[in-house]
Image (cartoon, rainbow, N blue to C red):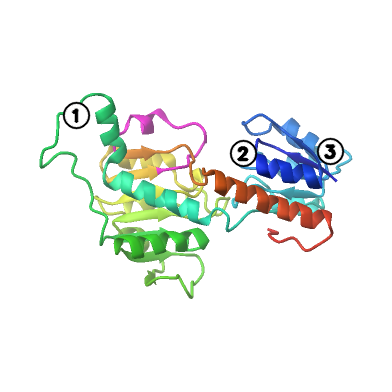
Amino acid sequence: MKLFVSRPLPDAVLERARAHFDMVHRTETLPMSQAECVAALEGYDIVLPTLGDLYRAETFAAAKDMRCRMLANFGVGYNHIDVAAACAAGIAVTNTPGAVTDATADIALTLILMSARRAAEGERLVRAGQWAGWHPTQMLGLHVTGKTVAIIGMGRIGKAIARRCHHGFGMEVVFFNRSPVADPGVPARQVPTLHAAMAAADIVVVAVPGGAETRHLIDATAIGAMRPHAHLVNIARGDVVEEAALIAALEGGQIGGAGLDVYEREPVVPEALVRLDNVTLLPHLGTAALEVRTAMGMMALDNAIAFAEGRDLPNAV
């Protein structure tokens, strides 16, 4: 079968892909254009896309003599793929859950600490040569140990964040989830509403899937429920947080700060965010470790190989 890989991947992944498929991989790092997405559907049996490669209903409709029968997505999130439209076109869709869990949870903890302890602001001070030395009231931040964290979305990643917060920092865990969670993995309290969770916490971590159902879930009203000293961390998808509302809250000192790994119109980061000292900005580093990206690629290939061999798909969505 012919396989098309939309971005550069770790060498071990590409070597395995060559061993199993007639494989072509695209060397550009930017997302595919719609014309490229359509061409991949027409020319290959399996396409391995990733974040930013937009497979919408109109993409499938534009394909003539469609050859593709599978999208083996590289990543757990697949809101860039219209799964219903893919299925209607006879195309299976898979993702890579599990491989990203711990790495993404680690980045959440990185942002919690950086935002609460003003680490990015402090590093900028040192790099600019403006640090005059230690004194007792310099750059006082929020002490994390023993505080309350609210996790919005208690799936695999939410549970991994909860474990780190509870066992590592002795934090009380509350969470909001659309369905009941029988076993959050640590002592934790599920609250009935989003706003109740956000109002109860010193730190709010957003860990819900992306997509139409969660777009702007964290809006001005939700942010307004937060405590004035609380910090908001987003490691989900950028458009889950209403960026304009967050900027207004940060500019007005309505909340203590924010830590972001994702953005609403990624890779565009609003200048208003860049100017603010009370927000930590990372360039979507959630899974940016070689062993993690390799594991993601191998899981995507597990799905593709199972499809090629006529077996059940390990991670169908």
| Residue beneath the point at 15% across and 29% down | 132
Q: Amino acid at mark 3?
A: Glu
Q: Specify the farthest residue to the left.
A: 136
Q: How many marks?
A: 3
CA distance for labels 3 and 2? 19 Å
Find disc 3 in the rendering and name its residue.
42
Label pair 3/2, CB-CB below 8 angstroms: no
> Residue 158 versus residue 198: which sits nearer the camera?
158
Which residue appears farthest toward the right when viewing the image? 65
Q: In the figure, residue 273 lies in which quadrant?
A: top left
| SS at mark 1 in the image | loop
Of label 3 and label 2, which has the lower sequence position?
3
Task: Kindly identify the residue that appears in the image at 50 percent across and 65 percent down.
Answer: 178
Residue 73 screen position, x and y as percent:
68, 48
**Which region is colored magenta?**
260-278
Q: Is residue 77 left or right of residue 286?
A: right
Task: Indicate whether residue 268 is drawn in magenta.
Answer: yes
Q: How far apart are labels 3 and 1 at the CA level?
A: 58 Å
Q: CA distance from mark 2 to mark 1?
A: 40 Å
Numbered disc 2: secondary structure? loop
Residue indicated by mark 1: 131
Say left or right for 22 vs 186. Answer: right
Query: Where residue 52 is drawn, which disc sits there?
Result: 2
Residue 93 visible in the picture: no
- Which of the two marks, 3 or 1, is nearer to us in this view? 1
Contact flag, marks 3 and 1 (Cβ < 8 Å): no
Pick whichever of labels 3 and 1 is earlier in the sequence: 3
